[in-house]
Image (tube, rainbow, N blue to C red):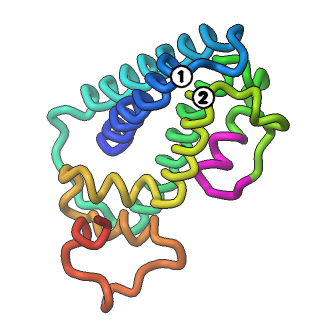
């Protein structure tokens, strides 16, 4: 729960860039402008609140050693949690009115498949276009690898989380002993 809490707090901070983009750049359709700004604000607040609640519930718990099985579970559940929260701006703005399609769009970005349910990208507000690009960027670098590299809280057992995230597994003979250094 600690890992997911920090991921959601980081995701909330990452939502600031597209939120500011939506405010500062003129939208292609003025009617979508207010909806986009409200969608990002609501998503940021919900994501931050969920992250803080997860951190609060895991506060004071004893540190555990992460096994390879735990690493796979954390990696898989992290993709699910981040996929759901990253779908909120698409759905709440009304650009993608169906929540399943919004989830598909965010998971498509996070997995870097390139598939999209948006047929006309010229009418999508600037902030949402940046958010779409950021989900693809996050998918490209691997959000859990980013987490291991950026946050020092997962110290013991982080190599198992790293192994679960790296495509095809990692050959640890070639990986440096410091997983954070390798992820960076």
**Residue plotted at (47% across, 19% down):** 24
**Residue plotted at (23% across, 50% down):** 151
> Would you say residue 4 sits in the magenta stretch?
no
Q: Which residue is mark 2?
A: 126
Marks 2,1: beta carbons within 8 A: yes
Q: Judge left or right: residue 85 versus residue 148.
A: right
Provide the residue span drawn in magenta: 105-114
**Residue plotted at (26% across, 65% down):** 157
Q: Position of residue 134 (x, y in %)?
A: 52, 44
| Residue 158 position by quadrant | bottom left
> Would you say residue 109 sits in the magenta stretch?
yes
Disc 1 crowd rating (10 Å Cα; few below 14, some 14-19, many 20+) is few
Image: 128 above or below 139: above
Q: Judge left or right: residue 3 versus residue 89.
A: left
Residue placed most toward the observer, 87 or 93:
93
Q: Position of residue 23 (x, y in %)?
A: 49, 17
Q: Which residue is mark 1?
A: 25
């Amino acid at each position: 729960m600690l890992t997911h809490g920090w991921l959601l707090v980081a995701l909330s901070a990452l939502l600031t860039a597209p939120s500011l983009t939506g405010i500062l750049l003129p939208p292609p359709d003025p009617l979508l402008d207010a909806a986009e700004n409200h969608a990002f604000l609501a998503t940021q607040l919900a994501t931050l609140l969920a992250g803080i609640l997860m951190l609060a519930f895991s506060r004071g718990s004893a540190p555990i050693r992460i096994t390879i099985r735990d690493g796979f579970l954390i990696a898989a559940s992290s993709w699910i949690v981040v996929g759901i929260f990253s779908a909120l701006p698409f759905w709440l703005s009304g650009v993608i009115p169906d929540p399943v399609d919004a989830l598909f769009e965010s998971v498509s970005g996070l997995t870097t498949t390139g598939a999209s349910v948006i047929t006309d990208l010229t009418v999508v507000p600037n902030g949402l276009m940046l958010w779409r690009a950021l989900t693809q960027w996050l998918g490209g670098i691997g959000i859990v690898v980013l987490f291991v590299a950026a946050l020092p809280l997962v110290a013991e057992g982080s190599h198992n989380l790293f192994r679960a995230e790296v495509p095809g597994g990692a050959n640890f003979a070639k990986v440096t002993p410091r997983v954070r250094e390798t992820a960076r």
